Image: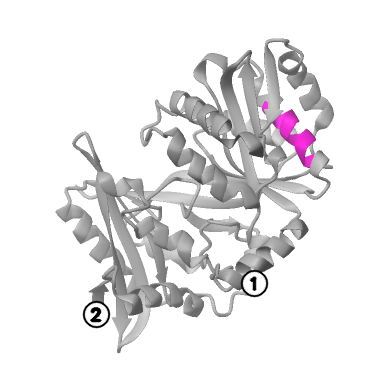
Amino acid sequence: MEIVKISSNNFSQVSQFHELVKKVYQFDTHFVLPIVEDVEVVFDPSKNKRFAYGNAERWLLFDNKECVGRIAAFYENKNGKITGAWGFFEVLEHIDYPQMLIKTAEAWLIEQGCKKIQAPVNFGDRDSFWGLFVDGVKNPSYLENYNPPYYQQFIEGQGYEREIEQTTYDITLDEFNYERFGAIAKRAMGNADYRFEFMDFGKLEKYAADFVAIYNEAWVFHEDFIALNTETLLKRFKSMKMAMYPEFAVFAYCKDRPIGFFVSILELNQLFKDFGGKLNLWNKIRFLLGRGKIAKAKAIIFGVVPDFQKMGIDTGLIMKCYEGMRKTKKIDSMELAWIGDFNPKMLSMLKSMGARHTKTHHTYFKNLF
């Protein structure tokens, strides 16, 4: 067996990194090939801001010149605190393959000064490629990890312990507990100082600035917080326009102060499952022609600034979102993902909404010293 570090300008190696998943999942009819560009942006220093204070490497594993596994490792160094992780782990079922891949990633992370490792995660935000799929319905969502059952044994067998249990919920418009939430949200939605509105695509710069203001205030206390800026977020909004309707982004205000948001996109894998991992010109045309057939939304971010938490703003955002989904007349359900077991309040609220638990992912950790 041989481990080879991938060179970013070696097209053949990068191609093998992506082609391997076809071999791993060749008999799994549920698997959806990730869009290559969505993965490659993670490893592009010009597009991934985490390279400003960290680094990433990728490896391929060969057995008799056949590519049988892959892995990526990454670390961040913020104010002298170094955190390490690995992800994008794919491997054929063999007792020796996972150990060689994981040990390679660990050795590199030790060289960088890491003492603790998270896995399998992403060199980026938690809403993408984060956690190991361990249970639930086999319909992988856009940017969501989906894995064979044997991965759990492989990872735990290398000394990794569960750190976070992430759950995913689905809710249909008909299952939504409208009466309960309507009553709870009435206090906020009936307050003349508060207003809830959908994003206007003609005023993207305004909403980008409002989003940044809310995010930087609400997320500043999170351990992995990185401040956003309006210019970057505006580019993100423009790129998301084709994957959402205006009613998919709800903003809350106290008078003119932005205080909360709830943003969703179309569940793109309903179309991407037929794209073979490629977003070329033809598939972009197919997307534009077919996006009206997507019947499911996926919530991607939800937040309220600290001053207005526990004041019903969250329920107001949910009610306005529900109204928006009804308004489109195209969406019949929504997925709400990445609900950590450290957030029992959110778990309780989802259940009271009428949402159903559909998938479970685990984030693992390992202390090296």
Tag 1, which secondary structure?
Answer: loop
Q: Is residue 322 above or below residue 8?
A: above
Amino acid type at image mark 2:
Glu
Let me know if residue 300 is in the magenta part.
no
Tag 2, which secondary structure?
Answer: strand
Give the x, y percent position of residue 271.
67, 64
Question: The N terminus is located in which quarter?
Answer: bottom left
Q: Nearer the viewer, residue 133 or 252?
A: 252
* 295 left or right of 41 in image: right
Q: Quadrant of residue 10?
A: bottom left
Badge 2 local density, few (<14 within 10 Å), some, or many (20+)? few
Residue under the image location 64 percent in, 72 percent down: 274
Reading the image, the residue beneath label 2 is: 2
Reading the image, the residue beneath label 1 is: 274
Q: Nearer the viewer, residue 159 or 75?
A: 75
Badge 1 local density, few (<14 within 10 Å), some, or many (20+)? few
